[in-house]
């Protein structure tokens, strides 16, 4: 019985921690339309779609696309936000998570490859 209670409390704590993201002061990211994709602009940098990614890789919440509050942007855990961002859109059916690469990044972490010819 104690084991079940401990497991329940641990699960509740984890879920509560995950729900505690502060979204009260979001960064409003701008976008730019390109011929083959839409890029995200932030602090003089341009981020372009790189590949799909597991939503569990999301780090700190940063903000959302201006005019599209459902399209949220996060850091990528363990990586610099000056090089990588994560775009996350939860449509209700299945979350869509896209890894975004800053256009000047030329070295990619091991195990990550782009699905797009512009990379």
Image: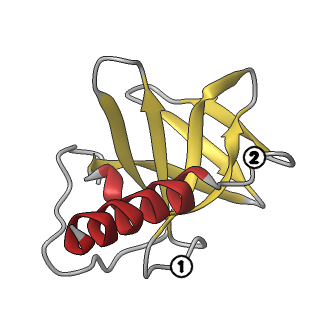
Q: Secondary structure at mark 1?
A: loop
* Residue receiving disc 1: 80
- The spot of residue 23 in percent (x, y) is 75, 46
Q: Secondary structure at mark 2?
A: loop
At horizontal 54% and vertical 39% (from top left) the residue drawn is: 39
| Mark 2 neighbour density, 10 Å: few (under 14) some (14–19) many (20 or more) | few
Q: Nearer the viewer, mark 1 or mark 2?
A: 2
Give the vertical position of 95 relative to 106 (above or below): above
Q: CA distance from mark 1 to mark 2?
A: 21 Å
Nearest the eye: 33 or 20: 20
Question: Which disc, if any, is residue 101?
Answer: none
At horizontal 21% and vertical 44% (from top left) the residue drawn is: 117
At horizontal 45% and vertical 54% (from top left) the residue drawn is: 15
Give the vertical position of 17 relative to 28 (above or below): below
**In the rendered view of the protein, which quadrant contains the N terminus?**
bottom left
- The spot of residue 109 in percent (x, y) is 26, 79
* Residue receiving disc 2: 23
- The spot of residue 98 in percent (x, y) is 36, 44
Q: Residue furthest left?
A: 111
- The spot of residue 96 in percent (x, y) is 34, 33
**In the rendered view of the protein, which quadrant contains the C terminus?**
bottom left
Count the labels in the image.
2
- The answer to whether one can see residue 103 in this image is no
Q: Residue furthest right?
A: 25
- The answer to whether one can see residue 24 in this image is yes
Marks 1 and 2: CB-CB under 8 Å?
A: no
At horizontal 65% and vertical 54% (from top left) the residue drawn is: 21
Query: Going from the N terminus, do you reach mark 1 or mark 2 first?
Result: 2
In screen coordinates, is 93 left or right of 40? Answer: left
């Amino acid at each position: 019985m104690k084991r079940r209670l401990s497991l329940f409390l641990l699960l509740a704590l984890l879920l509560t921690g995950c729900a505690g993201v502060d979204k009260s002061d979001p960064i409003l990211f701008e976008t730019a339309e390109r011929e083959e994709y839409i890029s995200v602009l932030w602090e003089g940098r341009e981020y372009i779609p790189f590949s799909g990614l597991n939503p569990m890789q999301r780090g700190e919440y940063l903000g959302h696309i201006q005019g599209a509050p459902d399209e949220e942007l996060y850091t990528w855990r363990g990586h610099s936000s000056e090089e990588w961002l994560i775009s996350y859109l939860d449509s209700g059916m299945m979350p869509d998570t896209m890894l975004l690469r800053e256009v000047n990044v030329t070295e990619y972490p091991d195990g990550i490859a782009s699905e797009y010819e512009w990379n």
